[in-house]
Image: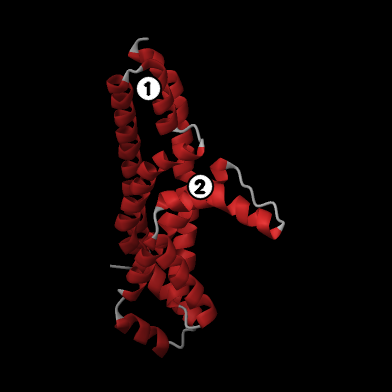
Amino acid sequence: MDWIDYLGPMLDGAWITVKLTFYSTILGAVFSFLFGLGKLARHWYFKIPSVVYIEVFRGTSLLVQMFWLFYALPLVGDILGLNMRIPPVVAGVLALSANIGAYGAEVVRGAIQAVSKKQYEAATALNFTPKQTLWRIALPQAIPEMMPPFGNLAIQNLKDTALVSLITISDLAFVSERLRNLTQESAVIYTLALFMYFGMALVLAGMLKMLSQYVGTWRRAAGGK
């Protein structure tokens, strides 16, 4: 087979990788804000679950998390008499989202805490509620600061999607390995895979840069520095 013959199936696998990256990054961003803000909450019933989530998912392997959701969770369900089997795509997206969300939560927490104390004092002087302070003062200043680390996490998430091949998802890594087993053309196939991952990372980095510029423009238009 010529290398051109490998492109079709590998592009199909790359499209699955793109979709996994998109869904897990969006859901991961939701987890980031949810648990990042939860860690800053005053009430223990928000703070403690957020701290536990962040520490567990930052302190354990993404691969183990993925295996647990796909292989171990159904066994736990059997013990409890519940059907807790989930499709491999769902397990992959959840594991990737939870992992990136735990790291992103620390980004959210740090960016909000980095807002000048004088800003919070001004909000108190204006009799703002905590909710108003968060939405009108803290987040508009913190979100632009979050964008560079969020961009790094998104690119890392793209690369981490290769692990879903181990739970039978036909992403680019899975298709590449299957083709290699069939043809033994390791150099050609993995070189193509390398350039495909690199190309996807470049596109993602460009999109995130444009998003970061838009957020910066929005902040300036809203009266930020």
- Which of the 4 quarters of the picture holds residue 216? bottom left
In the picture shown, does residue 81 fall above or below 4? below
Q: How far is mark 1 from mark 2, CA to CA? A: 26 Å
Query: According to the image, label 1 marks what residue?
Result: 180
The foreground one among 109 and 103 is 103
Which image quadrant: the N terminus?
top left
Amino acid, disc 1: Arg
Which numbered marker is on residue 83?
A: none
Q: Residues within 10 Å of mark 2 (few under 14, many from 20)?
A: many
Identify the residue at horizontal 51%, vertical 35% (top origin): 168
Identify the residue at horizontal 43%, vertical 68% (top origin): 36
Label 1: which secondary element: helix
Residue 194, horizontal then vertical, whole percent: 30, 31
Label 2: which secondary element: helix
Mark 1 or mark 2: which comes first in sequence?
A: 2
The foreground one among 86 and 18 is 86
Q: Is residue 35 visible?
A: yes
Query: According to the image, label 2 marks what residue?
Result: 93
The foreground one among 192 and 185 is 185
Which image quadrant: the C terminus?
bottom left
- Which of the 4 quarters of the picture holds residue 150? bottom left
